[in-house]
Amino acid sequence: MDLTFQVHAKIAKPVAEVFDAVYNPKKLSGYFTTNGASGPLDEGTTVTWDFADFPGAFPVHVRKVERHRFIELEWKAGDGDYHTRVRMEFEPVGGDATLVRISESGWRKTPEGLKSSYGNCMGWSQMLLCMKVFVEQGTNLRSFLY
């Protein structure tokens, strides 16, 4: 059994706008990396994500990007010295809506790996919720979650 999950949400905005909300560090910092993102998610780069409510800058390795379709990342697993893989997919649905899917995989098959995967599943679910509110309404919901 692989430790992997996928979460998803529909956002009532066009795919270009939703993709940019993740790709663009200024927008990402408006609802998710509330202490800053060091740069855009360009393929082959390493950026840092910093969270005001969860101190510490996290290196994020951008492995692959197809504009308005997907972003693939790697970052350090919370339970050890190895990396997990994150894939964000952006699919236009209906007129001006976007389905966003986020999956993460690669944890070690240990109790600690399972616990870490559950924590990240919750985190990505909350990120989607915060992104939806930010993109659709302009409100930083994260500041009220923690």
Image (cartoon, rainbow, N blue to C red):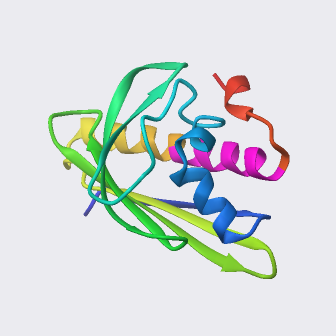
The picture places residue 81, in percent across and down from the top left corner, at 15, 35
- The residue lying toward the viewer, choosing from 41 and 53, is 41
* Image quadrant occupied by the N terminus: bottom left
* Residue 8 part of the magenta-drawn span: no
The picture places residue 26, in percent across and down from the top left corner, at 59, 39
Q: Which residue is at a point 73% across and 51% down the rendered structure image?
A: 132
* Image quadrant occupied by the C terminus: top right
Q: Which residue is at a point 68% across and 62% down the rendered structure image?
A: 17
Q: Is 120 left, or right, of 134 in this rendering?
A: left
Which span is picked out in magenta? Answer: 124-136
Q: Is residue 4 visible?
A: no
- Residue 53, relative to residue 47: is it above or below? above
The picture places residue 22, in percent across and down from the top left corner, at 55, 52
In the rendered image, the residue lying farthest to the bottom is 94
Tell me which corner region of the image, top left, top right, bottom left or bottom right, holds residue 76: top left
Q: Which residue is at a point 77% across and 65% down the rendered structure image?
A: 13
Q: Which residue is at a point 57% across and 70% down the rendered structure image?
A: 90
* Number of numbered markers: 0
Q: Is residue 7 visible?
A: yes
Q: Magenta region's main secondary structure?
A: helix
* Residue 130 part of the magenta-drawn span: yes
Q: Is 132 left, or right, of 137 in this rendering?
A: left
- The residue lying toward the viewer, choosing from 129 and 1, is 129
The picture places residue 113, in percent across and down from the top left corner, at 26, 41
